[in-house]
Amino acid sequence: MSISRLGAAAAIAVAAVTGIAFSISASQPESTHLILEQAAPQLEAIALQQGESSLGDLLLFNATFEADDGSINGILTGSLLVVAMPDSPAEGANSVQSRLTHLVFNVEGKGTIVVGGSAVYPVDSAAEMVAGQPQVRAITGGTGEFIGASGELTSVRHEDGTYTHDFTLLN
């Protein structure tokens, strides 16, 4: 291949890759982060069967939250429904169950942000998320200032029972 053809081929390849990169970055929506700190929740476990955790168990909770700068505060209410159990009880302390999650962040004076999805939890009807292990769920909507909200929420439980919620809201 001659040098001019090689140069032309290289220029076309660079242009193609650059075009793809611009296309990918242009298709990524802009986002806003909102970080809320949540107090330890008040939990109410409703077991379908006495004894061990089982499918259909429900965990209801509420907790207060606020932004670090105090600009946002409110109450989080939620429900967690057990929908899958481990294959074997022999998995012991490492056993996890899947729970469908419905969270409503009622932001005082601004509206609500609604979050849904599933996450894994230790096998125990009243167990909370494992500390330090992030769970990601979808933002499915909102009201007031958050009408039409979408994006994702990453939640992390801390050893003291508090949580940090990092919202990525798509603009």
Image (cartoon, rainbow, N blue to C red):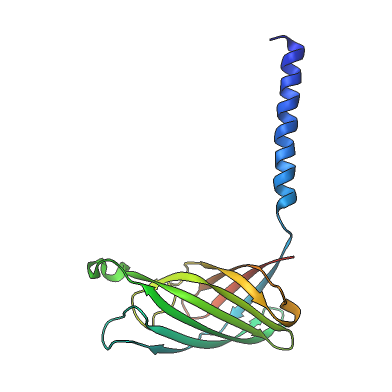
**Image quadrant assignment for residue 151:** bottom right
Residue 84, horizontal then vertical, whole percent: 36, 71
Q: Nearer the viewer, residue 147 or 31?
A: 147
**Image quadrant assignment for residue 86:** bottom left
Q: Residue furthest top?
A: 2
Q: Which of 134 and 147 is in front in this view?
A: 147
Tell how many labels. Answer: 0
Q: Residue furthest left?
A: 90
Residue 162, horizontal then vertical, whole percent: 52, 80
Residue 123, horizontal then vertical, whole percent: 33, 75
Residue 126, horizontal then vertical, whole percent: 38, 83
Q: Which of 44 and 157 is in front in this view?
A: 44
Which residue is at a point 24% across and 67% down the rendered structure image? 88
153 sits to left or right of 146: left
Residue 117, above or below 103: above
122 sits to left or right of 148: left
